[in-house]
Amino acid sequence: QLLQKSTPNGLTYIADRLNGGRLDHKMDHLACFMGGSLALGAYTDPSGIDSSRAKRDLKTAKALTYTCYQMYARTQTGISPEFVKFSGGNDFIVPSSAPFYILRPEVVEAFYYLSVLTGDPIYREWGWEVFQSIEKYCKTEYGYGSLHDVNEPSMKPEDRMESFFLAETLKYLYLLFDPDSEIDILNKHVFNTEAHPFKIFNN
């Protein structure tokens, strides 16, 4: 029930459920991790990647990640806001309550997982677009800053950088473009919630 489609282009998104069961047709940047999570689940499905469940989950993962890419591509800076609202006939809007970007990692995290698992070069292309936008609009003299409004390209970044930008956002972007990485997300390693890779112990 939470999985919804937008109008008119049928973008897949995960709505919020409010108290009382009513749906709030918004999707947070934070929810974009689900693209990578569903893809990893599909490729490690006990019934195999060719099972109907794995195919369903991979299809959903790709669709969600495409929506998350659009959350970047459709703004004036090429950077996603904190969340978007799905309403009207133009798929989604950037609400006045959440036009900011605090250097979040979830979208490039999904790009990384889907790139490694599917081998599709589109995820590197999207990641390169996002990286270029971050370089152009968020870079400061000594680091990177948050944006107050992703649809105001003339605004300077704020004097604030979240620690997860280095730990997660840049790490996933680096790994996305590292063809010689020893990280093996299917057989040898697992990332924790802060993007630290740990070896899997097999008995």
Image (cartoon, rainbow, N blue to C red):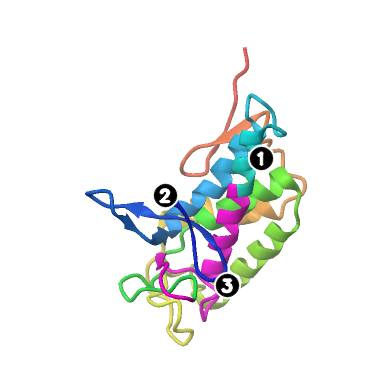
Which of the pair 26/123 is nearer the observer? 26
Q: Which mark is residue 2?
A: 2
Type of amino acid at the residue the image marks with label 3: Ala
Does the image show residue 23? yes
Disc 2 secondary structure class: loop
For label 1, the SS is helix
Image-quadrant location for residue 127 = bottom right
Residue 39 percent coordinates (x, y): 61, 42
Residue identified by numbered label 1: 55
Q: Which amino acid type corresponds to the residue marked 1 in the rendered image? A: Lys
The image's mark for residue 73 is 3
Range of magenta residues: 60-89
Q: CA gap, disc 2 to disc 1? A: 19 Å
Most foreground residue, 39 or 121: 39
Query: Which quadrant is the C terminus positioned in?
Result: top right
Q: Residue 91, how many percent across, how many down?
A: 49, 71
**Viewer-side residue, 10 vs 179:** 10
Q: Residue 100: x percent and y percent?
A: 39, 71
Query: Mark 1 and mark 3: span between their CA atoms?
Result: 27 Å
Residue drawn at (37%, 67%) of the image: 160
Mark nearest the camera among 2 and 3 is 2
Labels 2 and 1 touching (C-beta < 8 A): no
For mark 3, give the secondary structure: helix
Q: Quadrant of residue 116?
A: top right
Q: Categorize mark 1 by other alpha carbons within 10 Å: few (<14), some (14-19), many (20+).
A: some
